[in-house]
Image (cartoon, rainbow, N blue to C red):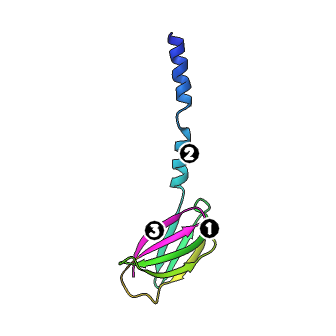
Amino acid sequence: MKRILIVCLLGMALLLPSTTITANNFLSNRIVDVLLEGDWVEITSDAGTGTLTNVIIYNSQEQKVLAEALGGYADGVDVGGLPGGSYKVRVYTTLTSYTEWINL
């Protein structure tokens, strides 16, 4: 009886979700970076997040004020024409999307 119990417990241990650890490691390596440099917003991604596709910038009232297509793993957007204030930058890649707030 003890052997059957031990075998069952070992079998159940083998069925534990080891893929969850792999998925968490994968998610922690997914990086999209948004950096404000003067009047220029630099956006970068990596192979874990895919290539950049587009960016949409919203003002503090959630109104779309700028939309632009992007490409590659590094690109940028000129925000010199926008008035000062807080803006939500929503970046889309081939694998994910990322949101960050910036202050002009």
Q: Amino acid at mark 1?
A: Thr
Which quarter of the rendered picture does the C terminus lie within? Answer: bottom left
Q: Amino acid at mark 3?
A: Thr
Q: Position of residue 28 (x, y in %)?
A: 51, 54
Q: Earlier in the sequence, mark 3 or mark 1?
A: 1
Q: Which mark is residue 51?
A: 1
Q: Earlier in the sequence, mark 2 or mark 1?
A: 2
Q: Secondary structure at mark 3?
A: strand
Cα distance between the residues tagged 3 and 2: 24 Å
Q: Position of residue 22 (x, y in %)?
A: 56, 45
From this view, report whether residue 46 is shown above or below residue 71: above
Q: Position of residue 73 (x, y in %)?
A: 61, 70
User: Which residue is drawn at the image coordinates 54% and 12% (left, top)?
Assistant: 3
Q: Secondary structure at mark 1?
A: loop
Residue sitting nearer the eye, 38 or 76: 76
Residue sitting nearer the eye, 43 or 82: 82
Residue indicated by mark 2: 22
User: Which residue is drawn at the image coordinates 52% and 54% (left, top)?
Assistant: 27
Cα distance between the residues tagged 3 and 1: 16 Å
Q: Which mark is residue 99?
A: 3
Mark 2 neighbour density, 10 Å: few (under 14) some (14–19) many (20 or more): few
Q: Which residues are magenta?
A: 88-104
In the orientation shown, which residue stands out farthest toward the front? Answer: 63
Magenta stretch holds residue 67: no
Q: Secondary structure at mark 2?
A: helix
Q: Amino acid at mark 2?
A: Thr
From this view, report whether residue 1 is shown above or below residue 84: above
